[in-house]
Amino acid sequence: MKKHWIIAAALTAGLGLPALAQDKVKLVDVIELSGPGATSGTNWKSGVDLAVAEINAKGGILGKQIEIVHYDTQSNPGNTRAAVQRAIDEGTYAVLGPVFSGPIGASMQIAQRAEIAQIVGGEAAGLTKQGNQYLFRTSLSQTAAMPKIANYLKNTVKAGSVAVVWVNNDFGKGGRDAILPELEKAGIKVAVDVATEQGQADFAADAIKIKNANADAVFVYLNEEESARFLRAAKQQGITKPLIGETTLLGAKVIELAGDAANGVKGHVGLSIDAPIPAFQEFGKKFIAKFNYTPDHNGLKGYMAVYMVKWATEKQKKFDRKGVADTLRGATIKPSEEPGILIETTIEQNGDLDRESFLAEVINGKQVINATLPKLKP
Amino acid sequence: MAEFIAYLIAGIATGAIYALAAIGFTLVWQTSQTINFAQGEFVMLPAVLVLLAIKLLGAPIWLGALIGIAAFILIFGVGFKLTVVDPMIKHGVLPLAIATMALSIIMKESAKDGFSAEAQNFPSFVPSQTIQVFGASISLQHLAIIAVAFAVIGALQWFVGGTRLGRQMQATAQNPTVARILGIPVERMVLLTFVINAALAVVASVLISPIYLAKFSNGEVIGLFAFIAAIVGGFNQVRGALVGGLIVGIVDSMAAAYISTQYRLAVPLVLLVVVILLKPEGLMGRKEERRV
């Protein structure tokens, strides 16, 4: 008799396990936690963790708690492919990450084949030109950002010539290929075009080359750590011309690493906790309280990625993997519907975003927003 | 011309760091006839330890620097010799070389997991300013690197050639058996060599980290270039390591300036191949023969 009770208890427990598992929805975050992308990836991961903690504390998505798993890609495209495949094999509801455009390009077809939404932090223009219906950005594409920068260089900086320094990876090459035609359209001459390597440690020679080009301004398009090293080298070489960049040049980590050398840097910023939007500032406070460091745009992107999944799931009122992508495509998510999205965001059919962005400057070690730029298609 | 001078000074500054690390390769080679594949990580880790001491103990920079540097010299100077070299050398040079490869990975991954995978700001003791030399803007930081590195290398040369202890160390490196017969405390001399290697690595680390930023992966580049420098200069000569380091640094800077940043890593490797083909013992090295 006792034996029967044990078997019955074991069966009940066994049947109970799947029931418990069904109370969770699994999200796998494939992200750069080491290697050259560690700064971006760490910020993104913290943003994801913050969103997951908030959503779970409020009862989860449609009553299910989020189970989050992070896989370190080591900023390596091969590892990223393997991690995305593993995420899909393990039944992820959507793939979050990565941030670097090269690894995204190398892994996006895997999620596409599985018809699972992949929500990424990459900015390279080419990513969304490949007809992948399952890839979604959390940042503006270079195609959207570069005209704003060229316009800024022409009208505000009044630059007749620009030195361009970029990182020779998918992100940097995409940015360089996007800015050059915009500069030409604006009638700005490219005085020197300097390619640098991902993970490069020594920028002295590049800074000397740029200084001697004697352009009216320098457009810097490097990843975060390299941006900081370049800014230090630029200061060491006495470059005094305006240093203009995109979101990565003005991030919190860059300002921290570059120290005084970051002061005076200006540029276009997609997302910032310093923007005059209360939801961003509130996010910044929560982030700093939880992780004890100031988030950059990648922290905001990771946070929004989880809320995009939540919004799409609640919109379709069921857990349907393919439906997440179908719901996101072409949608406009308003903070009034989903406060976690923080700012009104339109997702175009190809996965690109349209939303407000900002012009910023680093003053006394802090990012100061000078202007808010409207959506491209208001 | 001004531009060339600026590239030259930048190259010499970087080369001085490579030289410090390359001398470490040479010292370990002379005393144990092996290659320390963790040499790059020896330059990376002191900066991490300094920052760790500041972070964990809340110590001011100077105290954190003293604690971190002392900890490094103790663990990776004395400790490296006692726990890696001594047990492994009995089994031959190859197992020891492989042990240093393992050590390299352990140091790198420990720095990543125990501290951070992200680059960290490292304080500079020199202001970020420039001075004009023959029309070229020269960074004070580069000049400080050159001055300190050359002073340290000069002091080492004086110590090795001009002091009794240094000559004993040299004798030990040349022939430990004869040195032992002459009453030189060979074990102590070998230990001293490893402590000097660790101290050189500390100097290189403190000099370069404000520019490279402190990061667990910094040793990869420094180790590779210092290794090339040691071979180019002559693996068995301290002077060779110095010359090799400077050549590699200058070639790297000039390659980035006048060829292409994308191919800059290849240029020192081409130089290495050329030197091996023309002078296999290195530019300043001496031929060594072994009888079987």
Image (tube, rainbow, N blue to C red):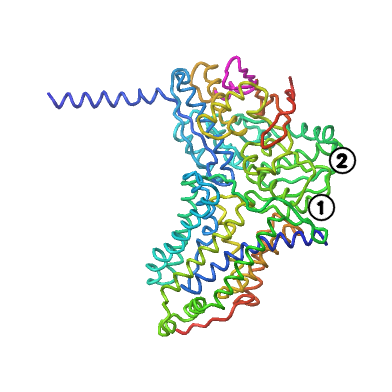
Q: Residues within 10 Å of mark 2 (few under 14, many from 20)?
A: some
Q: Secondary structure at mark 2?
A: loop
Have a look at marks 2 and 1 and say if they share a chain.
Answer: yes
First reached walking from the N terminus: tag 2 or tag 1: 2
Q: Examine the structure image and report whether residue A271 is included in the region drawn in magenta.
A: no
Q: Examine the structure image and report whether residue A332 is included in the region drawn in magenta.
A: yes
> Where A246 falls versus A345 (above or below)?
below
Marks 2, 1: nearer the viewer: 1
Q: Chain of mark 2?
A: A
Instruction: Name the amino acid type tagged 2.
Output: Gly
Name the spot of residue B192 as percent of width and height, x first. Answer: 47, 70
Rounded to the nearest whole Å, what is the CA distance between mark 2 and mark 1?
A: 16 Å
**Which portion, as a residue range, is magenta?**
A324-343
> Are circles 2 and 1 on residues that touch, CB within 8 Å?
no
> Which residue in the rendered view is the most extreme toward the left?
A1
Q: Secondary structure at mark 1?
A: helix
Q: Which mark, residue B211?
A: none
Q: Chain of mark 1?
A: A
Name the spot of residue B249 as percent of width and height, x first. Answer: 67, 63
Q: Is residue B272 visible?
A: yes
State the residue at coordinates (54%, 42%).
Answer: A80
Check disc 2 and report the residue beneath it.
A160
Quadrant of the frame with the N terminus of chain B: bottom right
Q: Which mark, residue A212?
A: 1
